[in-house]
Image: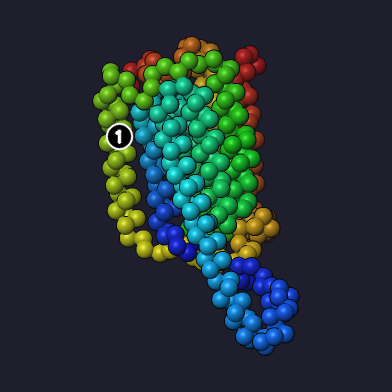
Amino acid sequence: MDQIGLHIPLGLSAALFVIGMIGVLTRKNALIVLMSVELMLNGVNLAFVSFARQSQSVDGHIFAIFVMAVAAAEAAVGLALVILLFRNRTTVELDDLNSLKG
Amino acid sequence: MLSLKRYPERPRGSLDPGLGSQGGGQHAALLLHGLQAPRTEAKSLFVSVLFYLFAIGVLVSALSVVTRKNPIAAAVSLVVCFFCLSAMYAMLDAHFVAVTQVLVYAGAIMVLFIFVIMLLNLRGEGGFVRPSLAPRALAGVAAAGLVGTGIVFALSAVTARLRADSSAEFGTIEQVGRTIFSGPYLIQFEVASALLTVAMVGAVVLAKRDL
C-alpha cells in the first residue's frame, strides 16, 4: 500500500463530494437528490477512514459509523417525506413545488 | 496496545528444512529473504492496482448516479458505488466499516430507495440538464467547480504516502467495539440509537395514511 499516495483516497473522497454536490444542485428528481446526498456523505466517510489509517487511530472509523447511522435516519425520513409529497401533489419533481414562491 | 507487525512472522526453518541443514541458518534465511522479497513486492503491486481499479469504479458509478435519467438505474449505480467503496475500506484496514457499508448502505438504505421508487412507479423523465434548466445546471456546476478547485489546491500540498506499517489489529471489529463501548463514545452511541428510533417513528408517522 505504501506506493499509493495519501492524496489518492483523499482526492477520491473530494471527487465524490463534488459529484454529489453537482447532483444535489442540478437534479430535479427528489429521489436522485437524496441519493446525491448519500454520495456526499460517503465522500466524507472515505476521508475519515483514510485519515484514521494514516494516524492509526480507530476514532475515524467510529465517526464513519456515526455518519452511517445519521445517513440511515436521514434516508428514512427523507423517503417518507417523498412518499407524502407524491401522495399530495402526484410529483417528485422539485421544480413543481413552488407554492411558497421561494 | 498495538503491535507494529503487520503479519505474525512465520518461522523460516519450518518452510524449508533442507536449506537450513545445508548452509547454516543465517545463510538460508538470507537466501529465503532474497526469494521472498519479489513476492511481497508483487503482492503489494497487486493491491495497489486493485485499489486504483476500485477507485475508478467508485468514480464511474458516482458519475452515473448523477447523470442517469431513470431513478432505478441511478439506484443500481449507487449500489455498485457502495460495493466499490466497501472494497476500498477493506483495503484501508477498516474492516468493520467495510462490513457496515455493505450491510447498512447497500443492504438497508438502497433497498428502501428502490422500494420507494417502485412504489411510486416513477418514469425516468428530466435528465441531467433540461434546456430550460440550463442556468441552474450551470450554477450547480460552477459552485461545485469552485469547491473542487479549492480542494485540489489543498490536496496538492499532500505528499505523504499511505503508511506500510499498519498494525494487524487496527480497524478490527474487536478494536472498534472496545473503543465504542469502553471508550469515550458510549454516550454518543446511545444518542445515535435514540436518533434512529426517533427517525423510524417519524418515518412511520409521516408515511402512514391516517393515524
Q: How many marks?
A: 1
| Image mark 1: chain | B
Residue B104 vertical position relative to residue B22 in the rendered view, above or below: above
In this picture the colour scheme is: rainbow
Q: Is residue B136 left or right of residue B110?
A: left
**At which x and y percent is residue A17?**
41, 42
> Does residue A52 show up?
no
Residue A52 spot, x, y in % from top left? 52, 58
Amino acid found under the numbered disc labelled 1: Val
> In the current view of this chain or complex, which residue is farthest to the bottom?
B24
Q: Is residue B175 visible in this depiction of the protein?
A: yes
In the picture, the quarter occupied by the N terminus of chain B is bottom right
Residue B49, given in percent of the width and then of the height, sits at 48, 53
Residue B176 vertical position relative to residue B205 in the rendered view, above or below = below
* Quarter of the image where the C terminus of chain B is located: top right
Residue A80 found in image quarter: top right
Picture quadrant where residue A36 is located: top left
Q: Residue at x 59, y 48 (%)?
A: B98
* Crowd class of label 1 (few under 14; some 14 to 19; many from 20; radius 10 Å): many
Judge from the rendering whether residue A51 lies leftward or rightward of residue B114; answer left or right.
Answer: left
- Compare residues A62 and B196 and report the one nearer the observer: A62
Q: Position of residue A69 (x, y in %)?
A: 58, 41
Q: What residue is drawn where x is 42% and y is 22%? A: B69
Residue drawn at the location 29% of the way across and 53% of the way down:
B153
- Pointer 1 residue: B141
Q: Secondary structure at mark 1?
A: helix
